[in-house]
Image (spheres, rainbow, N blue to C red):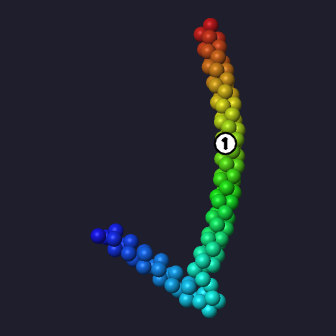
Amino acid sequence: MKRFIIGMLILGGIVAAAAVVMKRRSGSDVSWDEFARDTSARMSEATAGGSERAKDAADEAKEVMTDAAAEAKDTAEHASDEAQDLAEKATETAVNLAEGAEHSTS
């Protein structure tokens, strides 16, 4: 029942909007056929413009993702290099401590 009432309200709104548009255009002697062609052309233009904007947004998102991936790769390489340096320093320190302990016991 709710769906029926909501559907009728929507349908009534569409009919009322069409009546208002036709009343405003009645002074210019526009028929339903001309009105439909004009509206259809405007809708096609709007759809084309929307798909163009969507394509631009997708291209921009792709570019941002590519830049982010490249930056993440650089960061990962830098972190890997830092970890390797720290591991080498830790190994060197352990060797130095072992040599120091060996000399102190001798």
Q: Residue placed at 70% from the left, 41% from the top?
A: 70
- The answer to whether residue 17 is left or right of residue 42 is left
> Where in the figure is residue 6, as x and y percent of width and height?
37, 72
Task: Name the spot of residue 33 as percent of width and height, x first.
Answer: 60, 77
Q: Residues within 10 Å of mark 1 (few under 14, many from 20)?
A: few
Task: Evaluate whether residue 33 shows in this view.
Answer: yes
Quadrant of residue 52 within the rendered picture? bottom right
Quick check: 28 left or right of 3? right
Q: Nearer the viewer, residue 23 or 99?
A: 23
Q: Secondary structure at mark 1?
A: helix
Location of mark 1 (residue): 69
Residue 29 drawn at (x, y percent): 63, 88
Residue at point 34%, 68% (across, down): 3
Q: Residue at x 70, y 38 (%)?
A: 74
Between 17 and 84, the one nearer to me in the picture: 17
- Residue closest to the eye, 21 or 2: 21
Q: Position of residue 89 (x, y in %)?
A: 67, 25
Give the left or right position of residue 81, taking residue 20 as reference. right
Quick one: which residue is furthest to the bottom in this view? 27
